[in-house]
Amino acid sequence: CYVIPRGDRVVIGATVEDAATTHCDVRGVASLLDAAVAVCPGLADWVLDDAWAGLRPTTVDGAPVLGRTRWRNLWVCGGYWRNGILLAPKAAALLADAMDGSSAPRDAALLDACRWDRFFAPRAPESSRFLEGHGG
């Protein structure tokens, strides 16, 4: 369970289910609320005003997809499964540096390992990996 303050609200998350639907069931919400109150007892007096569900896109190898694509004006940043909220700041910094050409060698190697076309074989010369400014 995580508890994140957002202004005058608190976000509590999250469950993981092997499903392709976006629904909130009572059991899942209750388990999250119980865990959140165990960590922050004061939350027991708050009013629940919303519950929502979303999908957790992922990749077959479990690594995110980051970086330039074969289209020069399209960059991707996704496939984090349940770690998006944790990795978003670092991913944004990696992409910003790659976009302005200031990636450190270690970061460029990380982007190369997470490129979108890693699932396709063989690697073609027009692969994002070989485009100028990709950083990899």
Image (tube, grey):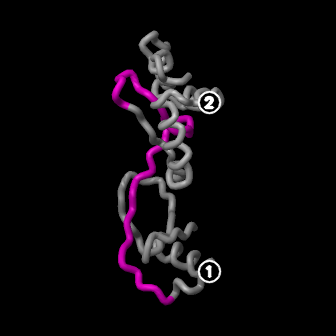
Q: Secondary structure at mark 2?
A: loop
Give the residue displayed 54% in from the left and 70% down from the top.
3
Mark 1 crowd level (few <14, some 14–19, many ≥20, 10 Å Cα): few
Q: Which residues are magenta?
A: 45-74
- The disc label shown at residue 38, or none: 1
- Please state which of residues 2 and 68 is positioned toward the viewer in this rendering: 68
- Please state which of residues 119 and 88 is positioned toward the viewer in this rendering: 88
The nearer-to-camera label among 1 and 2 is 2
The overriding secondary structure of the stretch rendered in magenta is: loop
Where residue 1 sits: x, y (%)? Answer: 57, 67
Callout 1 amino acid: Ala
Where residue 102 sits: x, y (%)? Answer: 54, 30
Asked if the residue under mark 2 is in contact with the one under mark 1, i.e. CB atoms within 8 Å, the reply is no
Q: Secondary structure at mark 1?
A: helix
Give the residue displayed 48% in from the left and 57% down from the top.
17
Callout 2 amino acid: Ala
Quadrant of res 62: top right
Give me the C-alpha separation between circle 1 and circle 2: 42 Å
**Residue 104 located within the stretch drawn in magenta:** no
Give the residue displayed 46% in from the left and 69% down from the top.
6
Q: Is residue 19 above or below residue 110?
A: below
Mark 2 crowd level (few <14, some 14–19, many ≥20, 10 Å Cα): few
Which residue is outermost to the bottom? 45
Give the residue displayed 56% in from the left and 67% down from the top.
2
Q: Is residue 8 above or below residue 121?
A: below
- Please state which of residues 92 and 44 is positioned toward the viewer in this rendering: 92
Where residue 12 sits: x, y (%)? Answer: 50, 70
The residue that label 2 is drawn on is 104
How many circles with numbers are drawn on the protein? 2
